[in-house]
Image (cartoon, rainbow, N blue to C red):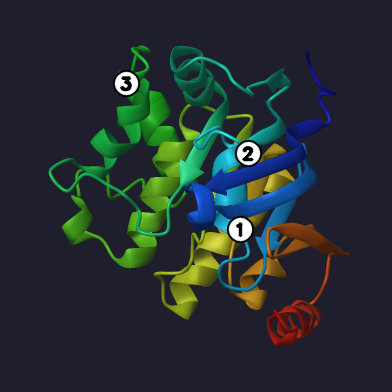
Amino acid sequence: MTITAAIAAELRDVTREYGLGNARVRALDGVSLAFPAGSWTAVMGPSGSGKSTLLHCAAGLDRVTGGRVFLAGREVTGAPDRVLTDLRRRTMGFVFQNFNLIGSLTAEQNVALPLRLARTRVARADVRAVLAAVGLGDRLRHRPRELSGGQQQRVAIARAMVTRPAVLFADEPTGALDSASARTVLALLREMVDRDGQSIAMVTHDPAAAAWADAVVFLSDGRLVDRLVRPSAREVAERLATLEAAPC
């Protein structure tokens, strides 16, 4: 079954539980959420609200306990690992908070890695073009230890983008950066949406980062509780503070 091309990824009545018996924890509780194509959605909520679990389930990195998940127009619920791996390589990119670059490889080699893993022909010109697009055309041969935190995160974004994914998932992409580097990365993501029509789903704890998105959705105790469209950082911070102050 497929979904409309206007939706990059979708969760329908998704639950995700961990553990057994009395130790069972429900991280997601009946979440239904669509990430529009060509748009940037930020996911926020108090600590332990299920933000990262939601992102991992939407990206097909974590299997759901119940409900259905669609990625780039295809249902991935219960798909075999081989099919999931192939679909992820072709349709999604994932940016981690801690970059996850390989220290022994140059920036150019790190960006080419997804293509090599997918056994796709690696066109050096394409890899260099992606690095140039994130402002690192002069850092091709630099290894991660020779780059600043913001530069490393831009290499990670280039690596996620080199396969031209239908949707880019980002888990706290600015959490390990200073404020100047964070603004540079967020401006890059905004440009990718506005100029290239990229679809982005981002988890963040930072209201200032969330305010760059087109919409912000809020989780609490594994449930979707609110949505703001093009909010200011202040509006996001006030809504988040209300959720964090709510009794358990």
From the top left corner, tell me how far across and down residue 120 is, in percent.
37, 13
Quadrant, the C terminus: bottom right
Q: What residue lies at 52% left-to-right and 49% top-to-bottom?
A: 21
Q: Residue furthest left?
A: 104
Q: Nearer the viewer, residue 114 or 224?
A: 224
From the top left corner, tell me how far across and down residue 86 is, in percent.
47, 16
Q: Which residue is mark 2?
A: 58
* Vertical comparison of 26 with 84: above or below: below
Q: Is residue 202 left or right of residue 247?
A: left
Quadrant, the N terminus: top right
* Vertical comparison of 176 with 53: above or below: below
Q: Which residue is mark 3?
A: 117
Q: Which residue is mark 1?
A: 51
Q: Nearer the viewer, residue 89 or 127?
A: 89
Q: What residue lies at 57% left-to-right and 17% top-to-bottom?
A: 79
SS of the residue under disc 1: helix
